[in-house]
Image (tube, grey):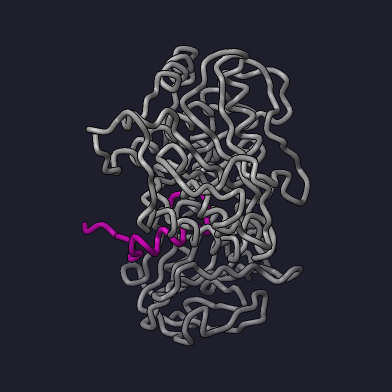
Amino acid sequence: MTAVTSSLSEDQQKKLLSLLGHVRLHLLYKASVHGFAALAFHNRCDRQGPTVIVAYNDAGFVFGAYTSQDYSQSGQEVHDGGAFLYSISSGGNKPLKVAGITGQCAFTDGAAGPNYDALVFLDADGAKIQSNPGKSFTFKAAEMHGEDLTLNEFEVYRVEGLGDLLAKPWRNIRWTAERKEQLMKAILSYEPDIKTVQQARVLLVGPIGAGKSTFFNSINSVFRGNMTCQAIAGTAGRSVTTQFRTYTIKAGKRGEAVPLILCDTMGLEENADTGVNIEDLLNILRGHIKDRYQLNPLTPLQVDSRGFKQQVTLNDVIHCLVYVVDTCKISLLSQKMLDKFATIRKKANAMGIPQILLMTKVDEACPLVAGDLKNVYRSVYLQRKAREMSESFGIPLSCVLLVKSYSEELELDEDVNILLLTAVEQMLNYSDSFFENQVVDHAKTDQPELYRFTD
């Protein structure tokens, strides 16, 4: 007997799953095989728990309805706060999702085909639908099904939940004291490939309150062995950092310098006249702005200003750019903010600067991670957010790192340290990629050469 297979393409299934969460789909009913009839539908789909209808038409639309309730031919109106209608069009990027009208039923549980009032499937036991926007659900017919009411296929899937934790982490982290010591040793012994450069220089960029300064303080605390607050951090609605700052980290109170300089600057904001100016940011990348320069959102630094460094070497430029985003506020990032990130990314790409996306406050974003940080790469929610950020920024998922910084603790924690040090290790690895792309005259290694980007 030939197996009954889904008509969903890989892309359509991916978009449908994005609406349903961490689930798998089990095909119960396929009209082209079992018949376009209400009886055939009920024989295979009644009392199956959560299900999703997938209807196809010749206009290229894939659309349908989800309910968390059973079909049982009870003859009753069924209320389901989780029910929704959806549509995936051939030309659309994101699927349309339509929630029910408050106080109205999701569907009528009769002996006919699935009846969601606004959409009635298998109408009169045929390969067609009724469309009644405004009854239980409100939508535009052209957006839902392209006003094509004839179906060429009709399927129903059981929606099976897979829980809030992945069976195995999507990124392996070794949570041991030996791993922490291994990371510390590797970072402290790091040497840039270019002899005239002593320290990798990494710039942190992100919206106000994303946790840039807190991240630096946390890294500094790990190497000092106690909590520190060298960089001013806060929760104000305005950027606490107003200067361009370069921070050197020491291993212990009077120990050797870690071969990493973390650079902090004013936060990004939506409006052009607030937050760090993009021109200033580009000059920071090129190494032209001096430490402790007071940034002015309205007036970018001019070439003839006192804070402008005319002669730049490889020691001054940024070797790795890190975007810092608050995981709790990912869904609140406006298009203007995403456009700013896109502009910066395009310029940094042209300069050949490797980039990392750092998702902070993962414990605040996911209760499972708050309970046990080791769940950070098993959390279904955080994995979904990481993929969302990867797609929004155009950055490979391998360049997206999840961290928790110290914000309220008074003592260091080994799991937090491991996650922070893993991020630092990647920053050094990416800085190496920058150095490997430089053309250096190895015959002149006694002093730094003047440097300028060719973008």
As for residue 16 lying within the magenta part, the answer is: yes
In the picture provided, is 237 more to the left or to the right than 344? Answer: right
Give the image quarter of residue 216: top right
Which residue extends farthest bottom? Answer: 147
In the rendered image, residue 311, in percent from the top left (x then y), is placed at 45, 46
Residue 48 appearing in the image: no
Residue drawn at x 60%, y 48% is: 307
In the rendered image, residue 106, in percent from the top left (x then y), is placed at 65, 68
Where is 165 relative to 18, above or below? Answer: above
| Closer to the camera in the image, 6 or 47 | 6
In the rendered image, residue 166, in percent from the top left (x then y), is placed at 47, 37
Residue drawn at x 56%, y 34% is: 403
Residue 403 appearing in the image: yes
Quadrant where the image shows the C terminus: bottom left
The magenta region covers 1-24
In the rendered image, residue 25, in percent from the top left (x then y), is placed at 43, 53
